[in-house]
Image (cartoon, grey):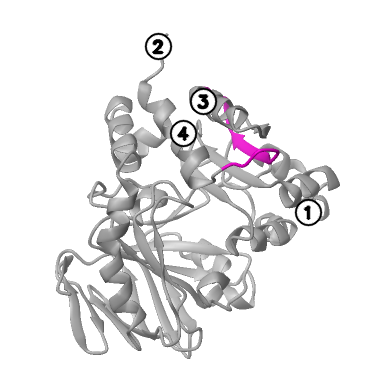
Amino acid sequence: MAVDPRVEQYARLLVERCVDVQPGWQVLVQSSPLARPLVDEVVRHIARRGAYPELRMQFSQWSFPVDPVWVEEAPVEAVAQLPSIERETLLGCDARIVINAPENTREGSSISPEKMTALREALAEHSRRTISLTYPWVGCQFPVAALAQDAGLTLHQFEDFVYGACLVDWDELARTMEPIARRFDAAEEVRLVGEGTDLRFSLAGREGRIDDGKVNMPGGEVFYSPVEDSVEGVVTFAEFPAVHFGREVTGTRLRFAGGRVVDASAQSGEEFLVSTLDTDEGARRLGEFGIGCNPAITRHMRNTLYDEKIFGTIHLAVGAGFPFVGGTNVSRIHWDMVKDLRAGGRIECDGDVVQENGAWKL
């Protein structure tokens, strides 16, 4: 059967732009058999660059580089430690490409909070390496039925959506995000106002990063790590569910004081929300403020990788901050939650309205 020509373009983008594979590199490629067309093309492009693909295929693919079937059955003390061969692979690879292609997007959602905490502890060193960008990596998705179903689309429609959001002129999109980054780089205080939301935090001394398709794919955001103890006020994620490792939490409301979440509630999934916020000392602090800037993404897909890039939205992540933009918060979690500002919301920088109802006023 003929392979969609966009698959080869997608693979070249991952290998050449996102990771920029160099000769001799050992590149960890994680995926599932459902993504074989893209995996094959990625391997071909890695080979043409004189590098070595190290394949890790899972039948039950989820966000952690271990199998959820094993996590379900193994004792907690085993889950809390990575086997040496896996540790050496995760910490020793020169680059990493994760191609998410799940059979079921709820995989792993039945794992107990105790085991999830143990697993995060086992992967803490790997997570720090990933979030600090000390080596090149990219996370992406291959269009499969489960992801299309979550988005409420046919597989063909979802394929068009994925390639439309990823196969863009990334240099041109970067140029459109530069004025946004300059305005927020110059800001001392940011205020977010929307439904159930009035939140303030400081960006003093912090510079943002433009995501122009070199880490997550798709890119299309400007993001920061706010000053850790500066966050004050309330944010309500009323528009979209907060999705994390196969779990959905709806109507999430977080109240911050002194930079910490001091009250958390939700219409559904509140127990999971609170248990995740109690993962460690840093889980109740804000690690990221991001601004969605990808004009090809206009609707919610129940897919955070895409939803956080929706033009006219912002996202906030509790947990680990980004050291490469000045973030100092340390946590085993990083949970992005998306807030829609396109109907009655606004962003202020030092008292000036810079975005209203999703439209920029720079």
Percent of width and height locating residue 100: 51, 38
Q: Which residue is mark 3?
A: 41
Return the residue nearer the eye: 60 or 212.
Answer: 212
- Tell me the distance, in whole angstroms, between the alpha carbons under discs 4 and 1: 40 Å
Q: Give, as a single range, the part of the protein colored magenta.
A: 21-36
- Tell me the distance, in whole angstroms, between the alpha carbons under discs 2 and 3: 13 Å
The tag earlier along the polypeptide, 1 or 3, is 3
The tag earlier along the polypeptide, 2 or 4, is 2
Q: Is residue 295 visible?
A: yes
Residue 77 falls in image quadrant: bottom right
Is 251 above or below relative to 84? below
The tag earlier along the polypeptide, 4 or 1, is 4
Q: Amino acid at mark 4?
A: Arg
Q: Amino acid at mark 2?
A: Ala
Image side of residue 91 versus residue 234, left or right: right
Mark in front: 3 vs 4: 4
Residue 129 falls in image quadrant: bottom right
Return the residue nearer the eye: 156 or 203.
Answer: 203
User: Which type of secondary structure does the marked residue at label 1 adopt?
Assistant: helix
